[in-house]
Amino acid sequence: MSNFDKKLQDLLFNNARTHNAWLPKKIPDELLKNLFNLTKMAPTSANCSPMRLIFVKSSDGKEKLKPALSKGNLDKTMTAPVTAIIAYDLDFYEYLPKLFPHDDAKSWFEGREQHIKNTAILNGSLQGAYLMLAARALGLDCGPMSGFNKKKVDEVFFSGTNIKSNFLVNLGYGDDAGLFPRSPRFDFDEVCSIL
């Protein structure tokens, strides 16, 4: 393994942590645009790209988000420079003529509600995971969370659409003083097989 490979693995995985405390350093809009431009390259089935994002930066935006947050996620979200609402669009298949022009992929989904929902959640989650890797590659730290009221977030941020919230990711420059000890992970033989 080259030294570069080790540095990259450490940046994206070995040294990366879920952050709960943030340094008071702002994230410029241009960096968020770069983050999206990396994230959009993630693979999705039939290039369906169902993830939709809202980057909540402003005080007003944070106040709108606040009532939907669980108690344990309140302070760390309100102090994070940005909170990304990772959502999925249940109308994603309407865009397949643009995103997958070499086949009639839209017809694969029309009238198949459960297939639409399953595809949107799975691929939107995959894109959200890639967003965190892209954020780390750009020097940002992440704090992903599922502890929030999705119905409230959807009412405030996605009213009148067919977009549903999936999870939240706080973004910024983490304060290592707020890190917890790393929790244990499984060993290969506990959860993997090679057939």
Image: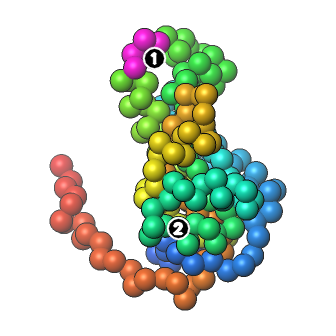
Q: Which residues are magenta?
A: 108-113
Judge by depth and name the residue closer to the eye, 76 or 112. 76
- Where's residue 126, x and y in %? 48, 45
Residue furthest bottom in the image: 177
- Can you identify the residue that label 2 sits on? 74
Judge by depth and name the residue closer to the eye, 2 or 20. 20
Q: Is residue 53 left or right of residue 165?
A: right
Which of the colour schemes (rainbow, by chain, secondary structure, one colour) is used? rainbow
Quarter of the rendering containing residue 182: bottom left
Residue at x 49%, y 82% (from the top left corner): 179
- Amino acid beneath label 2: Leu
Residue at x 69%, y 54% (from the top left corner): 61
Q: Is mark 1 in CB contact (under 8 Å) with mark 2?
A: no
What crowding class fits label 1: few (fewer than 14 Cα within 10 Å), some (14-19), or many (20 or more)? some
- Can you identify the residue that label 1 sits on? 109
Kindly tell me whether residue 137 is visible in this rendering.
Answer: no
Kindly tell me whether residue 29 is visible in this rendering.
Answer: yes
The secondary element bearing badge 1 is classed as: loop
Quarter of the rendering containing residue 29: bottom right
- Where's residue 158, x and y in %? 60, 37
Judge by depth and name the residue closer to the eye, 138 or 164. 164
